[in-house]
Image (cartoon, rainbow, N blue to C red):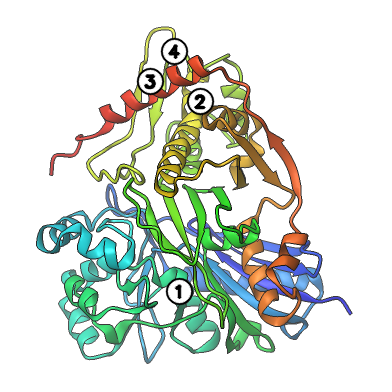
Amino acid sequence: MPQYVGAIDQGTTSSRFVVVDEEGSFVALAQMEHEQVLPQPGWVEHRPEEIWENTQTVIRRALEQADLRPSDLAGVGITNQRETAIIWDKETGQAVANAIVWQDTRTADIAKGLIDRHGADFFRQRTGLPPSTYFSGPKVRWLLDRRPDLDQRARNGELAFGTVDSWLAHRLTGRHVTDVTNASRTMLMDLEALTWDSELCEAIGVPESMLPAIVPSIGEIAPCGGVLDGTALTTILGDQHAAMVGQAAFDVGGTKVTYGTGAFLVSNTGTDIVHSTAGLLSTVGYQIAGDPAVYALEGSVAVAGSSVQWLRDNIGLISQAAEVEALAGSVPDNGDVYFVPAFSGLFAPYWRDDARGLFAGLTRFTDKGHLARAVLEATAFQTRDVLAAMEHDTGRRLDEVKVDGGMVANALLMAFQADILEMDVVVPRVVETTVLGAAFGAGLSTGVWSSTADVVAHWREAARFTPSMGEAERARLLAGWEKAVQRSMGWIES
């Protein structure tokens, strides 16, 4: 009989469920978008109950497509938007506020206060992370500061905190759990011990009673009920960690870039924690139950695919995202126009909350093709900045980088990415590697795949982009980009 696994991919803009067979092929897929709640500039929220309802709906639809029951699945994995914070009532399971999304910048003052009181190294040495609006622990503190009733209930042990994986796992299994990858993005977990750190919790102001149990990423977690009654939750992986597994980047130096709402570079550093001196994050890559954790260096770009959405929805330059490639290809180059998409500041390797977005180099010669091209090229430039920092930290020059996510369908962008990186860019046969990684984890837990080597055997290359740009042109473009980035900084003064 064929074997199947399921995977929930709960992302920033949508929820999906896929059914995958033992060959690593998608048998069924269902997807639903959820609303982006934007109360004021810099704030981004989601409605937790909407996410839960949508998740149940896509599970039912995908199983119906595949003509399967939950009991036909060997196991199920969850992959999720990582740093998004949710607080809910332990007794009722109901969320007590909207989720604060990873892109949200409202905790800038809290992050600054943590640095002023404790120093950035206090957090970086223990967690691999600098204080930033990015991470979920300070988001919890912000909610408790604004709602004294919630603060008191949290101290009474009545409230639970979790990232989106925890929210879904609790609804599916009744257990309050998270995995090591998601826990490593809270600023509350000791990166080496893989446990919650009492001093970190006290420093940030998050009661330990709110926190979920930390479990390995890949391994038996709990039986499911409700919409998945009959199978078990066997994997939890934050989205970028799942993509690393989906790209079969199990060897030291294995590096992937996922182009989604943002762009995320992750490089496997094995069982060694590499502490960055170049603005990157040290994080858990993944952990298989019974094995030591595998660590990684990560660089996060806040705005990648969402810049194309912005060009469509806010500016109206295109009517569909797919049109951007043709518009950008209508001009031979960027016309010396650069776009810095610092809508919520700049993430790695700059970490500047005071930066804001801009177009630079505009002249009367500039037309909409140059603007579209500049928007696309910004993703490649930001990726290059992070990869350069990664090579600095590891002392390792890469020959190639594996890429995935929606933007890899844009051949113009991928060719420019190879040119500006001066290395091969490799596209896999299955570009939806985030949800595939969660499925691979579920299958590794249950024997559908016997080992990571078995997973590697199911990975296939679909396309390869090789650099052809001359060194002088690359240097000229990078100089223009770096100048534009500097212009974007210091826009917000307080």
Whether residues under marks 2 and 1 lie with C-beta atoms below 8 angstroms apart, the answer is: no
Q: Quadrant of residue 452?
A: bottom right
Whether residues under marks 4 and 3 lie with C-beta atoms below 8 angstroms apart, the answer is: no
Instruction: Answer with mark 2 or mark 3, whichever residue precedes in sequence.
Output: 2
What residue does disc 1 label? 180
Instruction: Answer with mark 4 or mark 3, whichever residue precedes in sequence.
Output: 4
* Closer to viewer: mark 2 or mark 3: 3
What residue does disc 4 label? 366
Whether residues under marks 3 and 1 lie with C-beta atoms below 8 angstroms apart, the answer is: no
What residue does disc 3 label? 480
* Closer to viewer: mark 2 or mark 1: 1
Q: Residue type at mark 3?
A: Gly
Q: Residue type at mark 4?
A: Thr
For the residues labelled 3 and 1, the Cα–Cα distance comes to 40 Å
* Closer to viewer: mark 4 or mark 3: 3
Instruction: Answer with mark 3 or mark 1, whichever residue precedes in sequence.
Output: 1
* Closer to viewer: mark 1 or mark 4: 1
- The front one of 416 and 168 is 416
Q: Quadrant of residue 126?
A: bottom left
For the residues labelled 4 and 3, the Cα–Cα distance comes to 16 Å
| The C terminus sits in image quarter | top left
For the residues labelled 2 and 1, the Cα–Cα distance comes to 39 Å
Tag 4 secondary structure: loop
| Relative to 51, 428 lies left or right | right
Query: Counting other residues with Cα less than 10 Å from the Cα at mark 1, is it few (<14), some (14-19), or many (20 or more)?
Result: many
Q: Residue type at mark 1?
A: Val
Query: Counting other residues with Cα less than 10 Å from the Cα at mark 4, is it few (<14), some (14-19), or many (20 or more)?
Result: some
What residue does disc 2 label? 372
For the residues labelled 2 and 3, the Cα–Cα distance comes to 17 Å
